[in-house]
Image: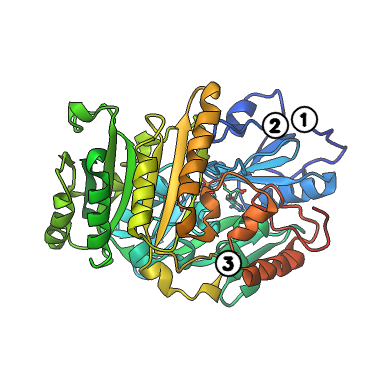
């Protein structure tokens, strides 16, 4: 349903593009990654700078409309879309400036991770970012951000030095440890609840440009053995050896032996964060977990590794994902994981185990909103399919995967991977104390809940 737009107008000085229903570009601008989401804003604004964002926020507040904000559009919960509200489409705000001396990067709010990596890699620098090039810096960072570099350099939000934020009352403020520290605490894991971020400043680290990285493939017939051996090795390996293990149907690609095409396989993504030559001996045991079927681990550009998963998640498919933290990886957890993984229902669907810990767990939990740092692993079923008639089957599989892990879950979830937005779910993203603090920060910065088209932290004065 599209709301009636009142007589309120955008400020006459607005320099960006505004698109209303029926106008050219409307459908393209409102489309998001998850094909399950089909929402129709009453106005889409593509700003040319921070002041246009201020205009859009002021317009929405005066018109009594909620604000939705879009960067990469990857929110599986569909939170960069709105029915009837104002959509601020930040993709018009590009630009990354790298200072190689201080090893920092200033980045505007519409930048995607592939664009960010491209600029920082010129200097052999990087910060933990998305595992796909098309994920937005915005939602990823504000929701926490686990990248391949996280076990070594922390969550993406751990590397955020400061941000510029347009507030609900239309001001532009800076948030950092020294300036508006409560806002800074909230935006590092609390999502887009407190304002529209227009630029970010990140800490960078020496990475690449060449790294030893790639993919190993085993048959799922050896599932339990391979996953246990993987666990035993990675739990005592240096944290610079980063891995993620997924179960999927063998893609019909030349690098996959033909007898595994369409059959359940185990794929292990590997990145050694350091000199590629130094990583060779450390990677070798991962090639000896069973009867190895394909070995694509080699020295390659870090940016190429960051793009390796891109073909597995095309935009516009129907998506349903979960992200739940695990207490550990006991044999029972491994068995439950492998049983579910052998039932993967379709070619682009996967069940993934990410190993965390390392630098993520060394940041004190109370440092910022991002939570559940004690978890050593995350279970991450993600279903992608095309035919709406297949929806029930995929939802059932994802939910069964999570239920099978039930005895081994910490109770904490990673909101950036979660499909729903009810308050119980949002609370599970944080401890009770931290959720209470987030409500206090929301009361201070957005008491009317203008920014509610997100995984919402409701201000205490508003009704559910
Ligand atoms: C294919 C794919 C791969 C992924 N891989 C990973 C991964 O490796 N690690 C990981 O941790 N997560 C991953 N994710 C999850 C990802 O972190 C979240 O979906 C995240 O929200 C995406 O950010 P975005 O900017 O692309 O999304 P959007 O949908 O544009 O935004 C998501 C949320 O953030 C808000 N937001 C965005 N920018 C701003 C801003 N400037 N100011 C205020 N609010 C803003 C939006 O309003 C929305 O609520 C992946 C998701 C997909 C679809």
Q: Is residue 22 above or below residue 294?
A: above
- On-image quarter of the N terminus: top right
Residue 171 x, y percent position in the rendering: 72, 61
Which residue occupies the foreground of this view, 298 or 27?
A: 298
Is residue 132 visible in the rendered image? The answer is no
From the viewer's perspective, is 216 left or right of 359? left
Residue 460 x, y percent position in the rendering: 79, 63
Mark 2 residue CB less than 8 A from any atom of ligand 1: no
Q: Is residue 196 above or below residue 18?
A: below
> Residue placed at 27% from the left, 48% from the top?
224
Nearer-N-terminus badge (2/3): 2
SS for tag 1?
loop
Which residue occupies the foreground of this view, 154 or 59?
A: 154
Residue behind mark 3:
369
Q: In the picture, residue 194 is in which quadrant?
A: bottom right
From the viewer's perspective, is 421 left or right of 389? right
Contact, CB < 8 Å: mark 1 with mark 2?
yes
For mark 3, does the 10 Å Cα neighbourhood hold few (<14), some (14 to 19), or many (20 or more) residues? Answer: many
Instruction: Report how far apart the C-alphas of labels 2 and 3 lie in the structure.
Output: 31 Å
């Amino acid at each position: 349903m599209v709301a009636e737009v009142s007589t309120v107008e955008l400020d006459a000085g607005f320099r960006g593009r505004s698109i209303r229903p029926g106008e050219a570009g409307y459908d393209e601008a409102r489309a998001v990654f998850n094909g399950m989401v089909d929402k129709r804003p009453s106005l889409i604004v593509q700003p040319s700078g921070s002041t246009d964002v201020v205009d859009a926020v002021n317009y929405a507040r005066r018109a009594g409309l909620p604000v939705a904000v879009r960067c990469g559009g990857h929110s599986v919960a569909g939170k960069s879309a709105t029915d009837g509200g104002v959509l601020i489409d930040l993709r018009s705000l590009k630009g990354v400036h790298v200072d190689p001396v201080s090893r920092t990067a200033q980045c505007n709010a519409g930048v995607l991770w592939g664009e960010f990596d491209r600029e920082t890699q010129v200097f052999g620098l990087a910060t933990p970012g998305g595992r796909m090039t098309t994920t937005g810096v915005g939602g990823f960072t504000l929701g926490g951000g686990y990248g391949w570099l996280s076990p070594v350099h922390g969550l993406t939000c751990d590397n955020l030095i400061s941000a510029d934020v347009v507030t609900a009352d239309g001001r532009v403020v800076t948030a950092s440890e020294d300036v508006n520290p409560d806002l800074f605490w909230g935006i590092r894991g609390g999502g887009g609840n407190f304002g529209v971020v227009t630029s970010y400043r990140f800490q960078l680290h020496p990475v690449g440009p060449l790294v030893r990285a790639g993919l190993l493939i085993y048959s799922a017939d050896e599932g339990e053995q391979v996953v246990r051996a993987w666990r035993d090795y990675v739990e005592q390996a240096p944290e610079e050896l980063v891995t993620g293990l997924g179960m999927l149907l063998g893609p019909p690609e030349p690098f996959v032996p033909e007898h595994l095409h369409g059959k359940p396989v185990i794929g292990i993504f590997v990145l050694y964060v350091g000199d590629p030559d130094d990583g060779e001996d450390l990677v070798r045991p991962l090639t000896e977990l069973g009867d190895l079927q394909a070995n694509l681990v080699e020295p390659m550009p870090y940016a190429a590794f960051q793009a390796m998963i891109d073909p597995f998640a095309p935009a516009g498919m129907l998506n349903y994902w979960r992200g739940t933290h695990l207490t550990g990886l006991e044999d029972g957890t491994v068995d439950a994981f492998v049983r579910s993984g052998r039932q993967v229902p379709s070619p682009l669907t996967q069940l993934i185990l990410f190993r965390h810990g390392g630098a993520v767990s060394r940041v004190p939990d109370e440092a910022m909103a991002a939570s559940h740092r004690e978890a050593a692993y995350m279970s991450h079923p993600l279903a992608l399919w095309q035919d709406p008639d297949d929806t029930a089957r995929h939802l059932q599989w994802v939910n069964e995967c999570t239920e099978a892990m039930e005895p081994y879950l910490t109770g904490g979830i990673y909101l950036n991977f979660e499909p729903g937005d009810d308050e119980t779910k949002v609370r599970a993203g944080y401890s009770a104390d931290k959720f209470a603090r987030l409500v206090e920060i929301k009361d201070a910065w957005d008491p009317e809940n203008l920014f509610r088209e997100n995984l919402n932290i409701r201000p205490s004065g508003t009704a559910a």
